[in-house]
Image: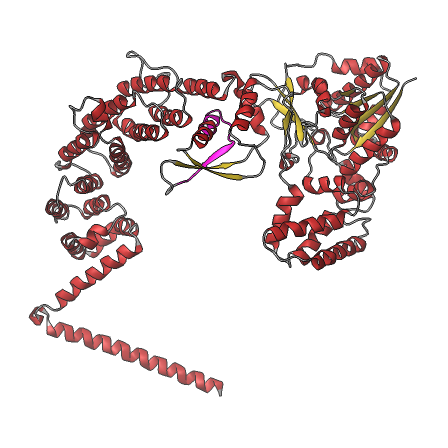
Amino acid sequence: MTSTDLLGVRHHGPGSARAVRDELARLRPDIVLIEGPPEADALVALAADPDLRPPVALLAHVPGEPGRAAYWPFAEFSPEWQAIRYAAEAGVPARFCDLPAAHGLAAPREDEPGDEEDLDRDPLGELAYAAGYDDPERWWEDVVEHRGDTPFRVIAEAMAAVRDGHVPSEREARREAHMRRTVRRAAKEGFGRIAVVCGAWHVPALALPVPARADDALLRGLPKVKVEVTWVPWTYGRLGSWSGYGAGVASPGWYDHLFTSPDRPVERWLTAAAGVLREEGLPVSSAHVIEAVRLAQSLAALRGRPLAGLGEVTEAARAVLCEGDDLPVELIQRRMVVGERLGRVPDSTPMVPLQRDLRDQQRRLRLKPTALERELDLDLRKPLDLERSKLLHRLILLGVGWGTPRDSRGKGTFRESWTLIWGPENDLLLIEAGVYGTTVEAAASARVREHAGDAPSAGTPANGEAAPLDVLTTLVEKCLLADLPDALPHVLSVLSARAALDTDVTRLMAALPAVARAQRYGDVRGTSTAGLASIAEAMLTRVCVGLPATISGIGDEAAAGLLTHIDGVNSAVVLLGDANAAAAGGGSPAPRDRWLAALRLIADRSDLHGLIDGRLTRILFDAGTVDADQVAVRLSRAMSPGNPPARTASWVEGFLPGDGLLLVHDARLLALVDDWLTALTLDQFTGVLPLLRRTFGAFAPPERRSIGERVRARGGDAAAAPTAEVDGGRAAAAVQTVRRILQAAAAAQTAGAREGTSGGR
C-alpha cells in the first residue's frame, strides 16, 4: 500500500528546514519528491559531494538563446536543500516534481516564473490578519520559525481554508497537475512511502483526488524547448530574486543564524554583532551585549512575541551597541543580516569547457572569486600580474564583468587597478559565451573578430559590414590589453581597409588617438603591434591632407567639436613619437613634425573660426614653432576693432584652454587682453561675458589671483600718470555727490538707532 506525506513549507524558511529534516528522519520515506525542475534529477546525487556548498542554484537555460534561463536557489536553511541532503545521506532517490523547465522557458516572459505570480492574493497575509497581525512575515516567524518545529497538518488545514473558492491560473493548474502526475508515477513504480516537499500553498491541491486523465489533458500539447541544467554558485545577496519558484528572503544572514544556532539565537547574534563593531574599532563591551539582549527580550515581551525577532535585535543593537548611530547599524545589516557568502560547486558539476577553463585559470593565477568586493592592484612588470590583467580584459570582451578597471592615474603605465566582485549571473554569461570557444582566450578572440566584422572592399561603402572606425580602434586597444594575437591581425586588417575608404576627416581624427594609445600600451605590455604603425601613418597623412577643407566655414558648435578632435590628434602624435618614422625607414618626417607643419599652413588663413584660430596659435606656441612676439602679433590682430567682440572672445578661449599661466608670466599678452576688455562698450561686454566667464573660470584659483594682482598693478601705474589729463571740475562734482550720499546714509542710521532706544523704554 502506498502512502503520501505532503510537507508544506516556506521556501528559505529555517524553521521549515529543521522540521523537514526531522520529519523525514521520522517518516523514513522510500522516495522524496521536491518542488523544482525535473530536468535536474540527474544532478541531485552531487549533493553528497562535500564540495557542493550552498548557497547554490539550479540553472536551467535554453542553449544558444541568451537570457532564456531560470534559477532555483538553495541555502543551507532551505527546506528543499535539507530534503536533498537527507535523500543523499539516507541513500534514497530524490526527484523534482514541478513543471519541467522545458515548458516554462518555451514562452519566456519579462519576469521569471514564481509562486507569487500565480496568486492574486497573499495567503500568509490573510492568515496573519486573521490572527491579529499586521505583518505576515512576523506572523510566520512567531507561529513557525520560532517554534522549532513545523505543524505540517495544521499548515495544510490553514492553506485549505485560504484556498477555499480559489480558481488557479492556467499555469498554476498545470504546475500542480504535473506534481500530482509525478506522485502517481512514483507510486506506480512501487515506492511505498512517498514524501513530497513543496510550497505550503500547493498542499491542498496535491491532496485533491483529481483523475489522472484530467491532469494528462491539462498537460497535453504544451510548448517545449530544449534546456540544459547545472549547479552554479549563488550568493546570499541574490536569495531575494524572484526566480524559479520565486520565493526570496530579505535577511538571509539572519535566517542562516536561526537555522545554525537554534540555541540562544538572540545572545549569539548580538555577540557576533559586537564582534563586527569591534573589528571596526568601535568600543563595545560585554556589558553592552548583556544590556542589548535584555532590551531585545523586553521588546519581544511587550509585543507579545515568543522570541525576539530581527526587528527587536536590530533596535537593541541600534540603541545599545551603536548608541543610536545608524551608520554602525548599516554595517551590521551588510555584514550579518544580508551577508555576502558565495557558494561552491564541485569539479564534477556539468560545465561548458569555457567555465572549466576559467576555473583552471582562477586557480593557476590565485584569483579566487568572491561575492565580497575586492580591490586588486597589478604591477604589469610582474608575470603573474600581467597574466591576471590579460584574463580580466578577456572576460570584459566576453561580457563577463568580474573585474571593473579603476582609475589608476599617478601610478604609471605599468600599473592597473581593479575592483573584483563575482555575481552568479557570470556563470550564465560564460555558458552563453561558450559558443565562441572552449577557452577564455579563444572565445574572446572569436568574439572580437565577430564584433569587428568583415573588411569593406573597394566597391563597398565605408559604412558597409565593418564596424565603425572608432569601434575598430577601440577593439585594437582591447586586443592589446587582452593579448589576443589571433584576433589582432583581423581587426587591424579591417581597420586598415576602413580607414582607407573613410572620407570623413573628423572620424579619422576621432580614431587616431586610440591607435596611438594602442601602440604605446602594446610596447608597455610587451605585446606585438606589428602593422599598427603603418595604419597610424596612413591615418595621420589623410588627416593632414583633409583638415584644411574640413576647417573652413564652420559654426560655433562644429568648431567646438573639431577642437576636441584637434586636441586628440595633438596628443596622439606625441604618443606616436618617432616610432612611425623609424618604421617607415627614417626618410619621412616624424608624425609630430608633419602635424605641426599642417597646422602652421592652416593657422595663417583669415577665414578660421576664432576658437580654432586661438587653439592653433597655442599649439604652435607650445611646440616652439611660433615665438612670443609672433603670438603677440596674432593676439593683437585678433583683438583689432575690426573683429566682432564675440570672435575675439572665442580666440581667447581657444588660446587659453584652462590655463592662465601665460597671462601671469607674459606682461605683453596680459596688457593686450586687458586693454581689449577695457575698450569694450557695456553692450559688447555683456555679449561676450559668457565666453569670458567660461574661459577665465577654468583657471586655477592661484592663477586668477595672480592675474588680478597684475591687472591691479597696471591700474596703479596708470594712476601715477600726470594729473593734467583729469577734468578737475567734473571730478569735484562727483566727489560732492558721493559725500552727500554718505551723509544721508549716516543720518538715516542715527535716526533709526534713536527710534529703537525709545521703543525699548
- Please indicate, yes or no, whether residue 66 appears anywhere in the rendered image: no
125 with respect to 412 (left or right): right
Query: Where the N terminus falls, by quadrant?
Result: top right
Of residue 271 and residue 77, the one placed in the foreground of this image is: 271
Counting from the top left corner in percent of width and height, residue 573 is at: 24, 32
Up the image or down, 656 lies above or below 193; here it is: below
Of residue 434 and residue 631, the one placed in the foreground of this image is: 434
Counting from the top left corner in percent of width and height, residue 83 is at: 78, 28
Please tell me which residue is depicted at 54% across the width and 35% down the height of the picture.
Answer: 421
Highlighted magenta segment, given as a residue range: 392-408
Say which quarter of the image contains residue 413: top left
Residue at the extreme bottom of the image, as rendered: 761
Please tell me which residue is depicted at 68% across the width and 31% down the height of the picture.
Answer: 54
Q: Is residue 399 magenta?
A: yes
727 with respect to 529 (left or right): left
Colour mode of the rendering = secondary structure
Of residue 291 and residue 745, the one placed in the foreground of this image is: 291
Q: Is residue 325 magenta?
A: no
Up the image or down, 637 lies above or below 745; here it is: above
Counting from the top left corner in percent of width and height, residue 484 is at: 41, 21
Counting from the top left corner in percent of width and height, residue 403 is at: 49, 33
626 with respect to 183 (left or right): left
Up the image or down, 320 lies above or below 690; here it is: below
- Please indicate, yes or no, whether residue 243 appears anywhere in the rendered image: yes
Say which quarter of the image contains residue 468: top left
Number of callouts in the render?
0
Please tell me which residue is depicted at 84% across the width and 33% down the height of the picture.
Answer: 22
Up the image or down, 486 lies above or below 326; here it is: above
